[in-house]
């Protein structure tokens, strides 16, 4: 009633003695280590990513500029008003930079 079900044969592994086969990187590194070559040193990961570093740099410089410009332009006003306006400007700048760096640029 049922036909014979046969399994396909397992794929044949490439023989290392095959003259037309190019050796893999792992095989080449293994052979180099047999002859005394040291493995390459591991790359250290940075503590802060490039995107975060650039964001913090631009946000810091922009915040300082906002505070300086507002304190010069509104020197005759109440200090609380200047501080509130500077804080609002800094919050908007950081929000916009955060959207650009982590929202828009994460797609690329």
Image (cartoon, grey):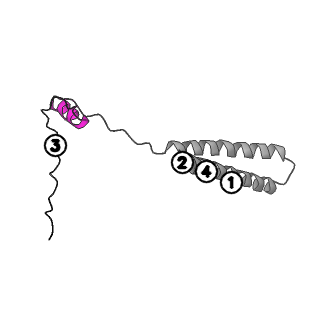
Residue 61 falls inside the magenta stretch: no
The residue most toward the front is 1
Residue 59: x percent and y percent? 64, 46
**In this picture, residue 58 sits left or right of residue 65:** left
The one of 104 and 47 positioned closer to us in this rendering:
104
Instruction: Please name the residue that numbered disc 1 is placed on.
Output: 91
Q: Residues within 10 Å of mark 2 (few under 14, many from 20)?
A: few
Q: Nearer the viewer, mark 4 or mark 1?
A: 4
Q: Residue 107's mark? A: 2
Viewer-nearest of discs 2 and 1: 2
- Give the spatial CA distance, label 3 vs label 2: 40 Å
x and y, in percent, of residue 38 in the image: 23, 32
Q: Residue furthest right?
A: 76
User: Decide: marks 2, 1 in contact (CB < 8 A)?
Assistant: no
Q: Quadrant of residue 6?
A: bottom left
- Please tell me the numbered disc located at residue 98: 4
Assess disc 3: are there few (<14), some (14-19) or many (≥20) residues with their C-alpha within 10 Å of its C-alpha.
Answer: few
Which tag, 3 or 2, sits closer to the chain's start? Answer: 3
Residue 40, percent from left and from top = 29, 34
| CA gap, disc 4 and disc 3 | 51 Å
Q: Which residues are magenta?
A: 19-39
Which residue is under mark 3? 13
Q: Earlier in the sequence, mark 4 or mark 2?
A: 4
Query: Can you tell which mark lies on residue 79?
Result: none
**Mark 2 or 1 closer to N-term?**
1
Q: Position of residue 69 (x, y in %)?
A: 78, 43
CA separation, marks 2 and 1?
Answer: 24 Å
> Which numbered mark, 4 or 3, is in the foreground of this view?
3
């Amino acid at each position: 009633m049922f036909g014979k079900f046969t399994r396909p044969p397992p794929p044949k592994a490439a023989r290392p003695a095959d003259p037309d086969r190019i050796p893999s990187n792992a095989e080449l590194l293994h052979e180099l280590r047999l002859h005394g070559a040291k493995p390459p040193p591991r790359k250290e990961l940075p503590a802060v990513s490039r995107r975060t570093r650039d964001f913090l740099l631009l946000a810091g410089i922009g915040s300082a500029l906002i505070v300086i410009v507002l304190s010069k332009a509104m020197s005759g006003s109440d200090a609380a008003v200047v501080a509130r306006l500077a804080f609002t400007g800094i919050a908007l700048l950081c929000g916009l930079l955060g959207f650009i760096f982590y929202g828009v640029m994460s797609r690329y």
